Image: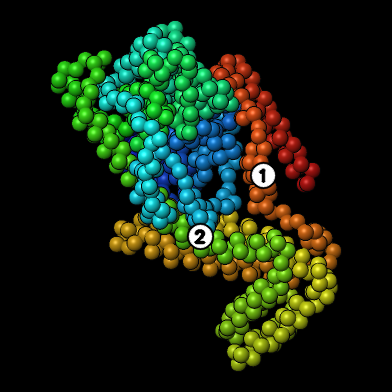
Amino acid sequence: AKIADKLTNEDYILDEKRRSVSLTDKGVEKVEKMLGIKNLYTPDYVRSVYHMEQALRAQTLFKRDKDYVVTNDGEVIIVDEHTGRLKQGNRYNEGLHQAIEAKEGVAVLQESMTLATISYQNYFRLYDKLSGMTGTAYTEAEEFQQIYSLDVVVVPPNKPIVRKDHPDLIYKTEKAKLKAVAEAIKKYHKEGRPVLVGSGSIKKNELIASWLDKEGIKYEILNAKNNEREAAIVEKAGEKGAITLATNIAGRGTDIKLGKGVREIGGLVVIGSERHESRRIDNQLRGRGGRQGDPGDSQFYVSTEDDLMRIFQGEKIASLMDKLGVDEDMPIQNKAVSKTLESAQKRVEGYNFDMRKQVVQYDDVINRHRKVVYAMRHKILDGGNIKPEIKRLIGNKVTDFTALPAKNNKRFLEQFEAIFPIDEKEITKIGDIKRDRQRKSEALKKVEELYANKEEELGEDEMRGVEREVYLQVLDTLWMHHLENMQHLREGIGWRSVGQRDPLVEYRAESQKLFDGLQNTLAEEVLRAIFHVHKMDALVKESSDDEYDTELTKLAENSVEKGVNEVTSGEANRDDDFKVKSSNRVAEQNKKRNDARKKKKAQRQNRKKNRR
């Protein structure tokens, strides 16, 4: 994180459209110099490259109070870009969350491991019937058709829309735009009209608030930091003279009722402080005003420094304004520019749609693996008898081991004995049999005898319990590693296109090899554990219980969302979590952490000395 902070724009190539960043040759040289190494890309420094890439992403692509917030306790919480809400309990994977924690100077927590994964598209496809209703589906009609085979039907409004949607006001600078927004709020506030101001991030939300503070105008602020007061704020947002500054939280499904006498003076004014990447979100914000035939106005304020404008031809518009001698505080209101913005939004939506489509195509591959693994898990968790499955694994493994005689397979004895603890002489005798069929038949006979003896030793019920317990534990561990391997494969498979190969076809082939490896390891580990377990082992006692606790089953217990079958008072107030701490308090906390670390280190060293 410290190295990434020292890098300049010349040291990396930033692609904001694709949200990717990579080091330039100059940047690589600078990093090597700072780390004191000759070549960053040797096998010895694979982990360093991995951490460096994530630190660079955290530094350049992820912004505080836009993509995430940091609480007073040093917790980094992700903000949902579409809803503006905090994603409690969610963490970025692949070490990115740790990179952000290091960037912000808070405690770096352990990297999370993916226990289960499914794309939204495949999750929705699990339902027998799919349908829905929303006011903004029409712009995404193509996606509904291609992904879910659903048609979008437009239902005409109950009452004619009388809301006035004004063309965008484009300003040269961000500062001039925010000043204009504050002046517009002041003007409408004098008229007594309620105003809802929507912004794309918490940071922008708070910037507008600071402009209103200068003007001495009272307002209510609604974002992810204080959304427990959402219902109370929204309830009063339509009253005379009310001013509500909100992120995307207020743009979705919020019904703002107009107060007494508001309809007569023009209704609710909706102000957008920037254009979002998606037209759907802009339309959702506009739709807060002029509901059910009510009057209202909507106006978007844009500057050439906004993210969307900056990425898509904002410089051209800024240079045009310079040539025309347009003053900083003077907006231009041009349909051609508004259309340019809409076309930019369409391009971003198209790119995001392609990305989601690609996610589905790649997730369809892992979905086949998921169905096999989950079918087995369900059978075990339902208490089913998996003896036939164990017999199948035994048959397959014996066939593999006896495919060649011992003289052609130097590790025959070692491999056979590692899984099936049969007498060494018996194994050697089997390995010396020249006929393949006879060799397999003798080996299978001996292993089935061993299996029957193990069942007699443990008891039939205990044996079934051990089989279920072992199979579930091994399957869950291997599945977690498989998901991680699939993620790494997914990230690197794109390079196959350089060799004129289709990455998706290559991904299917490689993923099948990984899944075959999972099944092979599963068979070996399950059989090894079952044939080496004894009656006194804790595992046998545990297996007599009908409940199975693995990382996945524990996760399932904790993942049921609060409020599914109960009415709660909303999330706890987190206003105090985001106030700036004094430097003394921070220093105090750091001292406590360092003292605790030193104490633990001393304890570890003492334990080592005692062992010696």
Q: Are marks 2 and 1 in contact (CB under 8 Å)?
A: no
- The residue beneath circle 1 is 558
- Above/below status of 344 relative to 205: below
- Between 86 and 266, the residue placed more toward the observer is 266
Q: Quadrant of residue 430?
A: bottom right
* Place of residue 573 in the rendered image (x, y in percent of width and height, measured from the top left): 61, 24
Q: Residue at x 76, y 38 (%)?
A: 606
Q: Residue at x 50, y 26 (%)?
A: 223
Mark before the other along the chain sequence, 2 or 1? 2
* Place of residue 102 in the rendered image (x, y in percent of width and height, measured from the top left): 52, 33
Q: Residue at x 68, y 47 (%)?
A: 557
* Place of residue 329 in the rendered image (x, y in percent of width and height, measured from the top left): 26, 14
Three-letter amino acid code at the position of disc 1: Asn
- Above/below status of 514 relative to 265: below
SS class of the residue under badge 1? Answer: helix
In the picture, measured across the screen, residue 216 lies left or right of residue 411, that is left
- The residue beneath circle 2 is 367
